[in-house]
Amino acid sequence: MNPQTPIHYIYDIIKSNSDLSDFYALVLNALVNSIVLILFSYLLFRILRGIGLKLVNRFAEKSKTDFDDYLVQNKTFVNLSNLIVFYIISAFTDELYLDFPVFEGVISSFVDVLLVVFTILTVRSILKTIKDYLKTLDNLKDKPIESYIQVFMILLWLVGIIIIFSIITGKPLMKFLIGLGTVSAVLLLVFKDTILGFVASIQVAANDIVRIGDWITMEKYGADGDVYEINLASVKVRNFDKTITTIPTYYLISDSFKNWRGMSESGGRRIKRAIIIKANSIKFVDEDLFQKLKGIQLINDYIEKQQADIDKYNQSNNIDKSLTINGRNQTNFGVFRKYIDEYLHQHSAVSDDMTIMTRQLAPTAQGVPLEIYCFSVDKVWKNYEYIIADIFDHLLASIPYFELEAYELPSGKDFNLIKT
């Protein structure tokens, strides 16, 4: 036997310098060639990983775009170097083990499987790079890009697994694809949540239902915080108590939830809170109370003008004022409502461009609710709560000046005072 090929160079040397049989000479020839190929592949791998990556990192640092930085961060070039090495090994495998058909088939199949795996890993790192880069763009950073990449990766792995089975079994790829149709019902059942999540993520993005960064409230799942991730299967919400709530993406279109984006994009954040006034503390304004209320600067002009109009009306209509209830009268409750209106209009933290209203609600067993409805200019939660506290601290402290009383349930101390 005299193959006379470069691959059989070691074989030729052995046969010309020893009496070994052809079989053992071929075994030694294949073994030496394998060692040479492994050493060459390792050397090439080190060159690509060492010199190549250093050059790529330097280029990425100097370039103005962030895209190449994300390529490095997601190990795209590492996966690519692995792919190149195994591609070279695959190119020489058939020749190296030509004299051992069975062994050649096993090695070739193994290398081809690794080629498929590293091809998928390389594509995945490129897709992750695209995702990271697109998230830096203002018009795309709040879109569920990760959902689409996950769907593509599922399909890619599915195709990869089919190709791997085709390589291992030696059957044509088309047979596996035809057989896949017979198990499509099973696949639909297995990937039901994935399919629902994919459809939901498309609807979420197309209808702009939720964006990354939105504050949402979904009481059913205990979610009350900012959305920080939208993927194929779930939406992750970082609650204000720093816990994480995971909501299936599909539920965003099947269940109801509250999105506070409209408030964030508006000119203010709503304040809606009531003070309950004791009904028996509401009364007409007599002369003594009138003189006292005139000293409140915010309503000084109002109360005097209002009283002048009332006196004029009562006189022109010959109203008998021997009883206060006759004719028109001011009430301490009505004057207090006017005071709150004036106070809110002059408050620097309350938006003048949005609704400012003080309204009386239906009486309850506890008293008469007086609701304050306005909008805070500052929408940051901490500042918003401070503004509410500042407003109601003042209003609660102002109630006695109008000879009104706020309702509260009696405590043990109140019962002791009754006994004494």
Image (cartoon, rainbow, N blue to C red):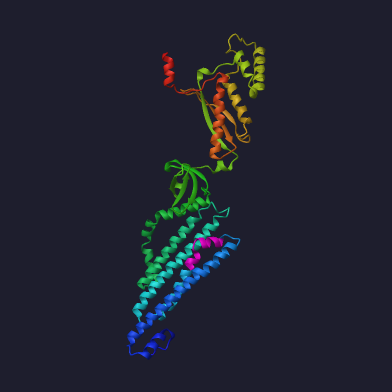
Q: Position of residue 418 (x, y in %)?
A: 43, 15
Instruction: Name the residue rendered at 55%, 57% in the picture.
Output: 134
| Above or below, 19 relative to 158 | below
* Nearer to us in this view, 413 or 309: 413
Q: Position of residue 43 (x, y in %)?
A: 46, 74
| Above or below, 152 relative to 30 | above
Location of residue 102 (image quadrant): bottom left
Q: Which residues are magenta?
A: 67-80
Location of residue 116 (image quadrant): bottom left
* Nearer to us in this view, 319 or 216: 216
Instruction: Name the residue rendered at 37%, 57% in the picture.
Output: 190
* Nearer to us in this view, 372 or 398: 398
Q: Name the quarter where the C terminus is drawn.
A: top left
* Label total for image: 0
| Above or below, 41 relative to 247 | below
Residue reaching furthest to the top: 322
